[in-house]
Image: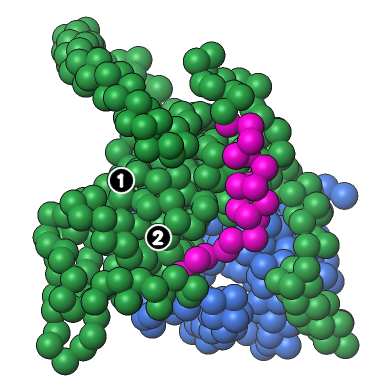
Chain colours: A green, B blue
Amino acid sequence: MRLIVLTVLSIALMVVDARFDALKPLRSQLGLFVSPLYYAAELPVRGWDTVTELTSSRAQLIADNERLRAEALLTQRKLQKLATLTEQNVRLRELLNSSSLVDERVLVAELIGVDPNPFTQRILIDKGENDGVFLGQPVLDATGLMGQVVEVLPYSARVLMITDASHSLPVQVNRNGLRAIASGTGRNEWLELRYVGDTADIREGDIVVSSGLGQRFPAGYPVGRVQSVVRHPSQSFAEVRVAPSAQLNRSRYLLLVFSPESGYGDVLPALDLSPDAPEAEAAPTDEPAATTQAAAAETAPAADAEEADNAQ
Amino acid sequence: MRSSLVIIFTLLVALLLSVMPMPEPFNLGRPMWLALVLAYWVMALPHRVGLLTAWLAGLVSDVLFGQLFGQHALVMTLIVWQLLLLHQRIRRFPLWQQSLVMLPVFGIAQMVLLWLNSLSGNRPPTLLFLLPALVSAILWPWVHTLLQGVKRRFRVI
């Protein structure tokens, strides 16, 4: 008897949770109590990190320091060029009467847990609603696009990786602008480009970047590099594999992006606002982006037909 | 009172173990810690730990894993229900035979979990989802011995 009651109750809960938003507040409150478990589970790893840091030798520290200094020098050189390039870009865009690119803002978050289910690719990060994180927010690491926020708890958030089997994002080949949909495969070694025509101009080694068409991810961030292209004469689409450029299973520090495409969420985060970011320019584009962003789920189905046409 | 605290503590440890980071190949065979601990308490103290405890523990793990509410709750209830039916018989078995009984119990649980997961749209393409049941069944004698030690040490009744 009790079994029947509890079973019916569980099924009812599942249906309500899947179809309505009524349980969201309860879930986030419970999450507040439960997420410390993730912190606790990560403690040994953190402890080990601290120990290795404390006991690393002086020579190693000096070597590290030198390497980092060299790296900083190199990036600064690139940055110098970038400043002039950005200016040039803005001027050209003004000539063309198109809107100028707005700088995005980022918030640094730390990984605190990996989803224990081996068949999903999700992680938990240490920033949540109180830091201005919102649903659908893009997440990057130092080398590329990682995923998007799918669940926001008060002090933590869950991120769905681009390699999860249920995730797709609109991308573009950097070399020629060919558009496609990159779908996760459930394994973190590669993504699949869906609906790329057999005759499409795509080669091994091509860099694939986000196209920004889904109104969710900002345009131009690297997604991966084409690993293999298999063309079957009997099939209308080629099989394209892309190795993600983000270090999906290694990055410890991630960047949460606040951009005009993805919206800024309900609150602008008070911290991390770089003073030179043009606030006024961002404001008008903010509103529509935020509303459409909520409505636009995975854009894959709608864009499929168009992509296929373009490819052929 | 103290007995309840000890039981709750072991359940919390089980939850902690189930989100412990593990290297990639082992992650596939991660033991069903919560199910193991619940199974022990149901067999040892059926008057204290029953369907309701299992259901609540399942709900907490749903929140922890960020899955649909009720998914693990249903599975844990099913495991405990089967064990409530079986416990008077298998309590007398030697531990390795108990393991053999645990294998189908946990296997059924993993099957149900797979069905529920596929309802929400992610179905693993392999049979590997049954691996945790096998690993849990193999671990059963050790978990049983350990928890029996805990039970005697803290005189949980």
The picture quadrant where one finds residue B43 is bottom right
Name the quadrant of the N terminus of chain A. bottom right
Find the magenta span and give its range.
A282-300
Is tag 2's residue or tag 1's residue first in the polypeptide sequence?
Answer: 2
Q: Pointer 2: what residue?
A: A170
Q: Secondary structure at mark 1?
A: strand
Residue ID at (50%, 15%): A276
Q: Residue at x 57, y 28 (%)?
A: A281
Could you say which is closer to the camera, residue B54 or residue A62? A62
Indicate yes or no whether the magenta region holds residue B99. Answer: no
Apparent side of residue A23 relative to residue A175 in the rendered image (left or right): right
Residue A221 x %, y %: 35, 43
For residue B85, above or below residue B145: below
| Residue drawn at x 47%, y 37% as measured from the top left | A99
In this rendering, does residue A45 appear at all?
Answer: no
Q: Tell me the tag on residue A222.
A: 1
Compared to A226, does A63 lie above or below? above
Q: Position of residue A297 (x, y in %)?
A: 57, 63
Q: What is the chain identity of the residue bearing mark 1?
A: A
Amino acid under label 2?
Pro
Q: Amino acid at mark 1?
A: Pro
